[in-house]
Image: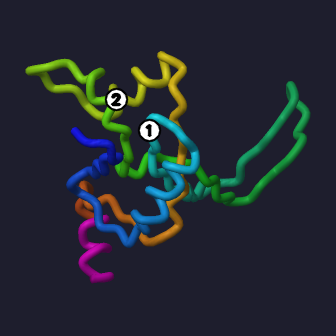
Amino acid sequence: TGPHPLLVMNGDLVTQANIGRMLEFHEAQECEATVGVSLYPLHIPFGVVRKEGTRLIELQEKPTEHFVINSGIYILNPSVLSLIPKDQEFPITSLIQTLLARNALVSAYLIEEEWIDVGRHEDLWKAKGII
């Protein structure tokens, strides 16, 4: 390992993420790791009700919720590699959990560019239409 941060990406991504900007962000945050995140819209096909007891407080017709999700793109300082056990499978999400348990600074970088996880068939077909 050297003095430079490492880029780790899941192998089933199609993205236009600006990795240079993500690296700049990582270095400016002075953190141990940066996790790329994206916004994922979840369309609810029904009216959503908020209530208190039996009293209706609010009715939202077919709302869209936006969740912040892990995009599968990571930047790691070389020093965190010593936390990875030798000779066994160790998912990168376990490494991030280990860092969080140690109160290490882990930042979240919002990826606003095109990002598709092609691990699902429908997303693979969507990506083929974009390329």
Q: Amino acid at mark 1?
A: Ala
Q: Give 85 or 80, whichever is nearer the viewer.
A: 80
Residue 80 position by quadrant: top left
Q: Residue at x 51, y 38 (%)?
A: 31
Look at the image and give the residue range highlighted in magenta.
123-131
Crowd tier of the residue under label 1, counting other residues whose Cα lies within 10 Å: few below 14, some 14–19, many 20 or above: many
Residue holding disc 2: 80
Q: Position of residue 45 (x, y in %)?
A: 59, 58
Residue 37 to residue 93: above or below: below
Q: Residue at x 50, y 61 (%)?
A: 111
Chief secondary structure of the magenta portion: helix
Helix, strand or loop status at disc 2: helix
Q: Position of residue 29 (x, y in %)?
A: 57, 45
Relative to 31, 91 lies left or right: left
Q: Residue furthest front?
A: 3
Q: Residue furthest left?
A: 87
Q: Amino acid at mark 2?
A: Val
Quadrant in which the N terminus is drawn: top left
Residue 124 counted in the magenta span: yes
Residue 129 to residue 118: above or below: below
Q: Residue at x 27, y 83 (%)?
A: 131
